[in-house]
Amino acid sequence: MSADPTQVLAFDTNCHLFDGCGFAEVSPGLHSFLFQPLWGDGDSNLYFNKTMLLALLGSLIIIGFFWAAFRRPQVVPGKLQMVAEAGYDFIRRGVVYETIGKKEGEKYVPFVVSLFFFVWMMNLWSIIPVAQFPVTSIISYPLVLALVVYITWVVLTFKRQGFVGFWKNVTGYDKSLGPVLPLAMLIELFSNLLIRPFTHAVRLFANMFAGHTLLLLFTIASWYMLNGIGIAYAGVSFVMVIVMTAFELFIQALQAYVFVLLTCTYIQGAMAEHH
């Protein structure tokens, strides 16, 4: 067995069913999400690894795509411009306008569109050959994105509501609640200021982490059972790899959509009047 726990797929290529090695020894685990530094020293916390490279490449791909699509916009759009406009318009009309409203939401369209395509691209790396790893399955990336949204929400709420209005907003102040108002305000305060950024990040992270683990499980199982009568089982496992890959395509887009939908919900809540 390989002694290095930091490989992308932690299994020995010589290990098969009926060869005397157990699948428990080669199955994916947390080690499948660890990578050796491509540059620098991991012990000093100053390094550059595969996930960072994928995040950087993903950002450049998104910037390059929209730059190529809109650098010379045409009244009658070409194929690339048409695809870019369709994606941009889907988020603008289907998410921002529907949640925040056209008048208030227009200024946030670039931010939300950028967020959607970045998250989607980070998710898509999971099924792209050679890369084969969703960047968002590392908790630090969704957490930073959630913190950006959280800070935007806090600043916007202060700006729109003022100091007193901010606390009414985050505590859900409603005097009609009567005696239960203090308890309700405490719950809302805890939920909005502490739980909100955590759940926003974990929802994306958990889905991508679980999806990648399942893909690894069936991929490794296909190779592990590729021996003797186990070939039949390997075929079934490989079919599951294809099914899970197709399902992941749907989940990747859905999670990016949910992430920006919640973002718009938070922005809309920041502008809502509380009395």
Image (cartoon, rainbow, N blue to C red):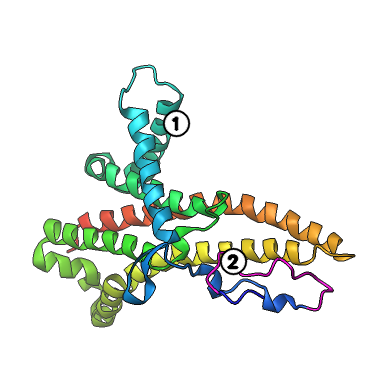
Q: What is the C-alpha distance between the residues marked 1 and 2?
A: 32 Å
The image quarter containing residue 226 is bottom right
Badge 2 is on which residue? Answer: 213
Residue 264 rendering spot, x and y as whole percentages: 32, 52
Q: Which residues are magenta?
A: 5-20
Residue 12 rendering spot, x and y as whole percentages: 68, 70
**In the image, is residue 8 part of the stretch drawn in magenta?**
yes
- Mark 1 Cα shell of 10 Å, populated few (<14), some (14-19), many (≥20): some
| Dominant secondary structure, magenta | loop
| Residue at position x 37%, y 57% in the image | 262
The image's mark for residue 83 is 1
Q: Is residue 231 left or right of residue 180?
A: right
Secondary element under disc 1, as helix, strand or loop, is helix
Q: Is residue 228 left or right of residue 60?
A: right
208 vs 157, nearest the viewer: 208
Q: Is residue 147 visible?
A: yes
